[in-house]
Amino acid sequence: MRRRPGLSARMKLTLSYAGFLAVAGALLLAVVWGFLLRYVPDNSQGLLGVSPNRYLLVRTFFPAAAVAMGFLLVFGLLGGWVLAGRMLAPLTRITAAARTAGNGSLSHRIRMEGRQDEFRELSDAFDSMLDRLESHVAEQRRFAANASHELRTPLAISRALLDVARRDPPRDPEELFARLQTVNTRAVDLTEALLLLSRSDRGTFTHESVDLSLVAEEAAETLLPLAEERGITLDVTGGAARTSGSAELLLRMVTNLVQNAVVHNLPAGGAVTVHTETRGGASVVRVENTGHPLPPDLVPTLTEPFRRGTDRVRTDEHAGVGLGLAIVHSVVRAHEGTLGLAARPAGGLVVTVRLPGTPQEPS
């Protein structure tokens, strides 16, 4: 927005300093006039014929007072200009850093030295904001690059299959259709996951009362055939845990957690436990599974989009698109909750979701 040019903050402070000094000097001279000259007799002989009279003192006092006032005004302007420059120097550095960030360079930091004051607080807050902004931009760029790569893969496979079919017409079309359907399904699943991730990031959904225990039971019932197929025990325990949010997004969150727990498990004889409870005013969902031991440095990165640890990559039809925990993290963040991941010493993962609780509805 274009604004009309005005006085700079330094000039305003300079004029304020000079004006304050001039007013203080004028008040001092007024006090001298009021309490000194009023007691000097106003006659031609002066006091006892020796001391000067008021007329002589006034003629002597006013020129000196005018010189003093002029000196105070000049001193106030020069001193105020210097002091204002020193006071506003930190603000100049912050402004320069803001312009640098506005031009796209987010790596610059102010790192202002000195003791804590208002300018240092502003500088530290600005540096913290740049840290978060740079991290967010880097994450978005990484996400865009990974999404482009993931979307390009099924399209490239489809094009390769069509080229093979064109060069080899006698090839069985049923096999081609089956492979194309598999590739297309993966592309559709990836697109839907990206749309869901974008929607949860925006937080544009209607809030309603949701019982996480019912959501957990629905997710477990949906994935029970998959668990039985893999020989994995799936249990839902705990009690009611009500929160406010999107029932659809919360169902997808719990479904992703349970599906990950089933897929990334032991080849046979594994177990998955889904537990819901209300604790400390928060509604808690905890999903725990058996599995292979996970490296400690891998666990914190599992919520990044398209992040797949070496020990968690699957090559079957439930390989997923690498957005399961990323969607969970986004849904939890949109509902103002917290997500905790911890590797089990015996192998597997414990995922704990805490969401703001709501009072239980009367039965």
Image (cartoon, grey):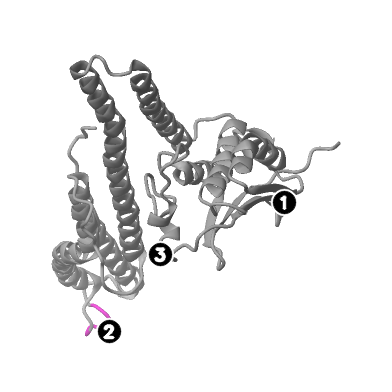
Where does label 2 land, which residue? 48
Residue closest to the eye, 265 or 342: 265
Find residue 297 and name its label.
3
Of discs 2 and 1, which sits in the foreground? 1
Please tell me which residue is depicted at 71% across the width and 56% down the height of the picture: 279
Quarter the N terminus occupies: top left
Where is residue 54? Give x, y as percent: 24, 71
Q: Is residue 156 above or below residue 139?
A: above
Which residues make up the magenta segment?
46-50
Q: Residue 277 has which mark?
A: 1
**Residue type (three-letter) at the residue carrying disc 3:** Asp
Find residue 141 and report its image quarter: top left
Do residues under tags 2 and 3 come within 8 Å of each other at their CB atoms? no
Label 3 crowd bin: few (<14), some (14–19), many (20+), radius 10 Å: few
- Nearest to N terminus: mark 2 or mark 3: 2
Q: Residue at x 65, y 40 (%)?
A: 220
